[in-house]
Image (tube, grey):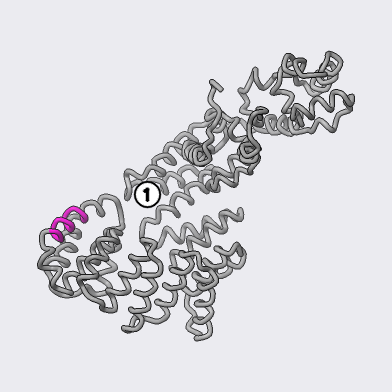
Amino acid sequence: MGTQRNELVAQIMENNEPFTDRQFQELVKFVRSGERERQEFLEEFDANARKRASGFSQNPVMATKVAQGYFALAQYQEAIKWFDWAGAGTLQCYLKAYCLRELGQYEQAREQFELAEKQGYDSFQIAMAIVETLRRKGDLEAAEDHLKRVSRVGDIRAEYHFQLGSLNDANGRREEALAEYEQAVTLDPNHTRALFALAYGCDLYGNEQKAVTYYKKCVASGQVHVSALINLAVLYEDREDYEEALKCIRQVLRAYPNHKRAQLFLRDIESSMTMYYDEDQERRVDKRNQVLQIPISDFELSVRSRNCLRKMNIKSLGDLLRITEQELLAYKNFGETSLHEIKSILTQKGLHLGQMLEDRSEGRIISPDVEEEQSESVNDLLAQPVTELELSVRARKALQRLNINTIGELTQCTEAELLGCKNFGTTSLEEVKRGLKDKELALRTLED
């Protein structure tokens, strides 16, 4: 590994010949193959580049190679500086445009792509690069128009279908997007971006078998595709195929030992392998949840009792388990007769008032107690679906199993309750906590 790094640095610093396409691809592949490789290359390369900057900046060939080194390191601002010193050649303009796009400078990126095309760069690649630039900028209509011009020329390759699929995705046309990604993979089975997009789309639609197949092809491309490996590990863990899940996560950690998300997943998977899961108990809990969701309107109550419960925002049997006799009797016009009616209903179901406040050992989900002084905006926020938190597929599935549908229901859970759900580990917990924090909310603590 050290030998290859030294050779690559020497090719840049000691050889006054430009990189061939193959040499440049080898440089990018090596630098982006892992955390250690990147850091070691950065230290040696950066020190040499700074020491020789005064001489290299006057030499277009050497300036270009140094720029390519920073490009491989994804240090795009530094790369642009060296590309400026290298001059406005075809390759320099194209790679500079790429750097500008990664930095979010879309107009300047498009200008550089067009300049590269005028100097002879492949027109199809430039067209695809501009389409992606416009899409990232958010100008979807212009991106579609640009893509239509390419289709009229008739030069249709895998990248065209990938870009069309990405545009369909951006416009919410998921099924059309998947069809385009499939076409891209048909034309180029090694199109990694299309494979990942296809796998992710299948994952979202619940077609887990296809998702696994495409993620595996994506991973087999040769590079360490971190997102594909982690998503594949999640699918394996959901199937309780923990050994395969571990292989995926360990592959990530071999390349990136300090990858926080992979470290969390590793702990999750190891915990799952030793976790006892009682399916009978889970069925009992699910059945009890269904009972708790029965609306109060399904029972024969006096008008007075019904009105009191409505004004107290008590809508289901589960709501009754979160309130005590004293709290009911303290409400205006709620007397012993109404209390007897309520207790009779609960007794028939083997339940009693205040039960959830006494015993939360089965991880039941409690809806938020909305205090009268809360503003309407807070109530609206709590009523939002948990999908607003933009959680991963795994976290969303876990919340579905817990029958958590709104943000308010989620805020009434403790960390322990969530972690008690099958396959809900610390990674999903951190996602949930971050999502709630963004909305200035948090999970319930035992002191609440």
Rendering quarter of residue 27: bottom left
Q: Is residue 212 above or below residue 368?
A: below
Residue found at x 75% / y 26%: 312
Q: In this rendering, is residue 1 above or below 269?
A: below
* Residue closest to the eye, 206 or 292: 292
User: x%, y% of residue 79?
Assistant: 26, 64
The picture places residue 229, in percent across and down from the top left corner, at 43, 52
Secondary structure category for the residue under label 1: helix
Total labels drawn: 1
Residue at (89% x, 27% y) in the render: 300
Instruction: Report crowding for label 1: few under 14, some 14 to 19, many 20 or more residues within 10 A (C-alpha).
Output: many
Residue drawn at 46 percent across, 65 percent down:
137
Residue 126, placed above or below residue 305: below
In the depicted structure, whether residue 430 falls above or below residue 313: below
Q: Nearer the viewer, residue 339 or 376?
A: 376
Q: State the image coordinates of residue 371 (x, y, percent, origin top left).
A: 65, 27
Q: Which quadrant would the C terminus be assigned to in this image?
A: top right
The quarter of the image holding the N terminus is bottom left
Q: Amino acid at mark 1?
A: Val
Magenta segment's dominant SS is: helix
Q: Is residue 353 magenta?
A: no
Magenta highlight on residue 46: yes
* Magenta segment boundaries in residue numbering: 41-50
- Mark 1 lies on residue: 252
